[in-house]
Amino acid sequence: MTSIQLKNLLEKELAHENWVFTYDREKDSVRVEDKESKKGVTISLPGLIAKYEQNGQNAIMEYVYYVKETLSSMKRQVTLNGQERNIFPVIRSTSFPTKTSDDIPLVYDDHTAETRIYYAIDMGKSYRLIDQKLAERENLQLDSMKEMALFNVRSLPTAVKEDTVAGNSFYFINSNDGYDASRILNDSFLNSMKKNIVGTMTISVPHQDVLIIGDIRNEKGYDILAELTMSFFASGKIPITALSFLYEEGKLEPIFILGKNNKE
């Protein structure tokens, strides 16, 4: 599929009287913007084509759904008071913007050299990141809000699926509730997993909708881990990082896998 074919398909699937499409030939991207709010979503066409080649038509329809929900949620009036149980932390890469398109600072905390913690109000089928203007309008105490968000993420289910490759075990959380990567903030869950790890414990958050815990028992395991995280990173709707972390004494340390059977 070419960029023009994909652009035409997106325009057809996302046709709406209040939405405007702009094609940027230089960046090879399409922006879908609401006429009234002037807010929108920019879609990288090469990235989506790569996902289409991996997952077929489903990849495109997932993006169509994501864009529709995002644009719709941007127009809803958001309130935070009384909604504290619906506030969650979300993990993003350090390259993710720290301000909205209106130049309003987002509420976030540093996490690792690769990741940041943002905060979102869950709206059912989508969520909205909390910015400082919204927090001030709602008279929200940021420390209390962040504490509640961490409490909420600890209340999410942590069912894992296990896969064993070349003597190494990998555990996946992939519930697709928007907060799979956020479970990296659930210390009690991580510590409970640590008790069952035989080798070296690794944690990966290649994209928003997956968390991978590795029990690396031999050198081959690091190569498998690198391939696994890169594959998930490339296929994610909201990529975070292809790097994995060592988990020791409650701390996360990035692990750099330099090549076959080499690590640092």
Image (cartoon, rainbow, N blue to C red):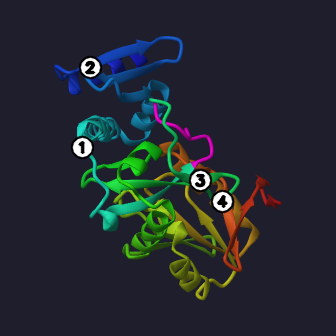
Check disc 3 and give the amino acid type. Answer: Arg
Residue 140 makes an appearance in the image: yes
Question: For this view, does 176 lie left or right of residue 73?
Answer: right
Distance from the alpha carbon under mark 1 to that under mark 3 = 26 Å
Q: Residue at x 54, y 65 (%)?
A: 212
Which mark is first along the chain, 4 or 2? 2
Could you say which disc has been placed on residue 233 in the image? none
Could you say which disc has been placed on residue 77 in the image? 1
Image vertical order of residue 241 relative to residue 152, above or below: above
Question: For this view, does 243 lie left or right of residue 258?
Answer: left
**Secondary structure beneath label 4:** strand
Residue with the mark numbered 3: 116
- Toward which corner of the image does residue 196 lie, by quadrant? bottom right
Check disc 4 and give the amino acid type. Answer: Ser
Which mark is first along the chain, 3 or 4? 3
Check disc 1 and give the amino acid type. Answer: Gln
| Residue 15 locus on image (x, y percent) | 20, 22
SS assignment for the magenta stretch, majority: loop
Could you say which is closer to the camera, residue 240 or residue 108?
108
Neighbours of disc 3 within 10 Å: few (<14), some (14-19), many (20+): many
Could you say which is closer to the camera, residue 65 or residue 50?
65
Residue stretch rendered in magenta on the structure: 93-101
Neighbours of disc 4 within 10 Å: few (<14), some (14-19), many (20+): many
Q: Residue at x 28, y 34 (%)?
A: 71
